Image (spheres, rainbow, N blue to C red):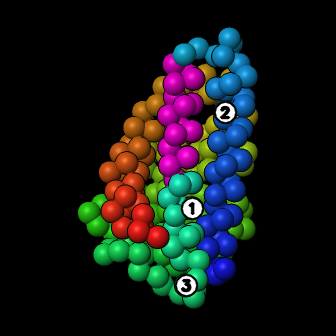
Amino acid sequence: MSSLSQGLEAGIRVLKTAVQSIESNIIRSRKETVDKKTVSVASRLVELLEKTMRLLDVLSRRIQHVEDGLVTISNYTYIFRTSKEVVLVRTRPEHVVLSLDLESNAVSLKTRDATLSVSPNSLTISIRSKLVKISPLSEEQFTSKRDELRMALKTIEKAVYRRLLPLIEQKLQKV
């Protein structure tokens, strides 16, 4: 297994931890105390993280036997490893960067307008100059920042669903 593939596996573990925290603390265990809108936003976030995990899993299987270096996934889509992180770059039609910081156990998804950063105990979304930071373990933070999180998710979802998921469906499912 290449170090690229190992880095992707580390990113999958980080996202899985965040998904489990959100599901157990917001969606499943407290349906009585959390309003439906907050559960809906948390579910959208979980769905986004699960699809990102799926992308990382498919990439990991695709590059499992590839040596380190710059790997071309498809036209305008590349993956490489630096000393501290594994980076997936999609340059066209819209610039999207998915980076996995191996030292701080964080997964970041960056687009022109937004950044989503996930670590096991924090989730940060910045849209232009607005920053939303929450803990996946805190019901109160999800409830109080629900509207900001919902608006920020809209921009991030657009990039993932229009730019990265078609990449999986068209190019990587041949593995």
Q: Say which of 172 and 152 sits in front.
A: 172
- Choose top left, top right, bottom left or bottom right for residue 104: bottom right
Identified at 36% across, 62% down, the residue is 167
What segment carries the magenta color?
37-52
The circle drawn on residue 23 is 2
Magenta-colored segment: predominant secondary structure: helix
User: Left or right: 101 with respect to 48?
Assistant: right
Task: Check disc 3 and report its element: helix, strand or loop.
Answer: loop
- The answer to whether the residue labelled 1 contacts the one labelled 2, judged by CB atoms less than 8 Å apart, is no
Q: CA distance from mark 1 to mark 3?
A: 15 Å
Residue found at the very far front of the displayed protein: 174
Residue 159 against residue 101 in the figure, above or below: above
Across and down, in percent, residue 44 comes to 50, 34
Mark 1 or mark 2, earlier in chain: 2
Q: CA distance from mark 2 to mark 3?
A: 35 Å
Amino acid on which disc 2 is placed:
Glu
Residue found at the very far left of the displayed protein: 93
User: Left or right: 99 with respect to 13?
Assistant: left
Residue 89 against residue 14 in the figure, above or below: below
Which residue has dot 1 on it? 57
Task: Check disc 2 and report its element: helix, strand or loop.
Answer: helix
Q: Nearer the viewer, mark 1 or mark 2?
A: 1
Q: Nearer the viewer, mark 2 or mark 3?
A: 3
Across and down, in percent, residue 13 comes to 69, 56
Amino acid on which disc 3 is placed:
Val
Which residue has dot 3 on it? 66
Task: Check disc 1 and report its element: helix, strand or loop.
Answer: helix
Mark 1 or mark 3, earlier in chain: 1
Residue 39 on the magenta span = yes
